[in-house]
């Protein structure tokens, strides 16, 4: 950083000029009427010049003002007047006290000025750094938004090629077969024939794949609502057993090749929740348990009362489990894991992200633990029982 020496010299010269002229002005004003004022009053007036010189220009002009003030104080105000001779011993003490006080006050004032300047410089430096931080943060945020946008594009492309195309292909194939079979009735030479069982099977395929597409769209809508903070909870008092039954019934086809064990604590209280959304959370957890555990294994679903007026739900499987590193990531959007805990690029991986958003909207939390005896995966979620606070249920009837 370059220093403008001309500016420094000019500023310092002004300080010396103020010190001399200030002391001379006070002396000229008080000397003709010195008999009306005590030496203490004169000393305080001269000290003001020292203070102003120190705060305005620093310690050196203040020192000049102090020395010049001592000389003027001695010459014009201490007897014998108009001479530097000091007759009375107490005047020596007064002069020494004035000099010490003037120098001390000047140094302290100058130091306070330096501290103020340093503080101001520090404030400006902090503002500069904060401005740079905001720029860097904004750039990083834009880079993160771009990265997530690219990730979303990739995930949606994968969804189109897998989560959407697969059911559409099944629906298209079933409808084409049914149409061909219907046309064969008009054209006996067409070999396409289906019995009643075959027709029902194709219609079931269409029904199941349509439901799959519908769930996919519902998940996208729920995820969009969570991202926008527009998820509306329709809280009602309901039974924990009914919520668990709703989830297990919906997941019955997914768990056809598994054993289901439901364990509910006796005399569980009613809960004030959005039963449909909470059942959706349990359904997602059961769905994951069925996907990532071997056929024929046991899936345990339980609920019990916890402390602080909470209900603890648990869904546990007998799969290979989830690594410690992936346990928090599985709740991120677009993240999925395979049985060995590595990243799975296929699919959107929205279920657990939506589940966490619903649980947190209820004021609860969800986490992952090891299953019984260290094997498998246990997903636990805490949900408040609820109360009659109208503020909490402002959106109940919307």
Image: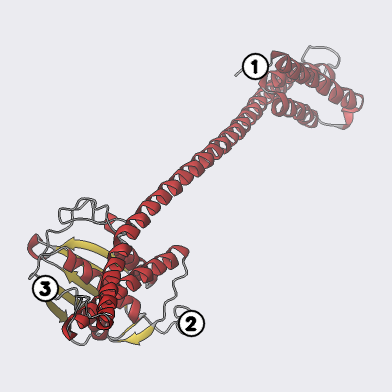
Secondary-structure class at tag 2: loop
Secondary-structure class at tag 1: loop
Q: Quadrant of the N terminus?
A: top right
Going from N to C along the chain, the mark reached first, 1 or 3, is 1
Q: Is residue 266 above or below residue 71?
A: below
Q: Which residue corresponds to the image point at 33% horizontal and 64% vertical from the top-left?
A: 164
Horizontal side of 121 relative to 259 (left or right) equals: right
Between residue 149 and residue 145, name the one nearer to us: 149
Quadrant in which residue 368 is drawn = bottom left
Cα distance in 3D space between marks 1 and 3 = 82 Å
Q: Which residue corresponds to the image point at 7% horizontal and 63% vertical from the top-left?
A: 373
Residue 315 coordinates in the image, percent (x, y): 19, 71
Quadrant in which residue 157 is drawn = bottom left
Q: Which mark is residue 257?
A: 3
For mark 1, what is the residue? 3
Contact flag, marks 1 and 2 (Cβ < 8 Å): no
Q: Is residue 214 above or below residue 3?
A: below
Horizontal side of 150 relative to 253 (left or right) equals: right
Q: Is residue 214 visible?
A: yes
Horizontal side of 270 relative to 28 (left or right) equals: left
Q: Which mark is residue 290?
A: none
Q: Which residue corresponds to the image point at 69% horizontal and 16% vertical from the top-left?
A: 4
Q: Is residue 16 above or below residue 242?
A: above
For mark 2, what is the residue? 398
Between residue 192 and residue 153, name the one nearer to us: 192
Q: Residue furthest right?
A: 32
Cα distance in 3D space between marks 2 and 3 = 39 Å
Q: Is residue 70 above or below residue 341?
A: above
Residue 95 coordinates in the image, percent (x, y): 72, 21
10 Å crowding of disc 2: few (<14), some (14-19), many (20+): few
């Amino acid at each position: 950083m370059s220093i403008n020496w001309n500016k420094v010299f000019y500023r310092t010269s002004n300080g010396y000029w103020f010190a001399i002229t200030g002391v001379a002005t006070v002396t000229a004003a008080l000397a003709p009427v010195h008999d009306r004022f005590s030496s203490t009053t004169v000393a305080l007036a001269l000290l003001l010049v020292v203070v102003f010189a120190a705060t305005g220009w620093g310690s050196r002009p203040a020192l000049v003002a102090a020395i010049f003030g001592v000389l003027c104080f001695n010459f014009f105000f201490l007897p014998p007047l108009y001479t530097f001779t000091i007759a009375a011993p107490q005047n020596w003490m007064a002069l020494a006290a004035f000099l010490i006080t003037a120098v001390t006050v000047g140094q302290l004032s100058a130091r306070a000025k330096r501290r103020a300047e340093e503080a101001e410089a520090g404030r400006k430096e902090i503002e500069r750094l904060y401005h740079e931080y905001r720029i860097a943060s904004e750039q990083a945020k834009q880079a993160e938004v771009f990265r997530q946008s690219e990730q979303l594009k990739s995930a949606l492309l994968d969804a189109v090629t897998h989560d959407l195309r697969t059911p559409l292909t099944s629906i298209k194939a079933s409808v084409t077969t049914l149409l061909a079979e219907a046309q064969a009735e008009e054209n006996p030479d067409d070999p396409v024939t289906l019995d009643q069982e075959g027709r029902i099977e194709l219609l079931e395929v269409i029904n199941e794949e349509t439901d799959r597409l519908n769930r996919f769209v519902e998940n996208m809508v729920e995820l969009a609502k969570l991202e926008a903070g527009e998820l509306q909870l329709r809280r009602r008092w309901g039974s924990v057993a009914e919520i668990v039954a709703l989830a297990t019934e919906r997941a019955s086809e997914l768990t056809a090749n598994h054993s289901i064990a439901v364990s509910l604590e006796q005399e569980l209280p009613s809960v004030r929740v959005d039963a449909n959304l909470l059942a959706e959370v349990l359904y997602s957890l059961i769905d994951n348990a069925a996907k990532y555990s071997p056929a024929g294994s046991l899936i345990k679903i339980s609920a019990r009362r916890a402390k602080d007026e909470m209900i603890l739900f648990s869904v546990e499987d007998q799969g290979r489990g989830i690594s410690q590193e992936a346990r928090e990531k599985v709740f991120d959007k677009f993240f999925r894991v395979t049985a060995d805990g590595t990243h799975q690029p296929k699919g959107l991986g929205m279920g657990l992200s939506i589940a966490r958003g619903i649980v947190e909207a209820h004021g609860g939390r969800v986490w992952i633990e090891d299953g019984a005896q260290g094997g498998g995966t246990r997903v636990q979620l805490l949900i408040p029982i609820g109360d009659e606070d109208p503020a909490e249920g402002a959106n109940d009837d919307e």
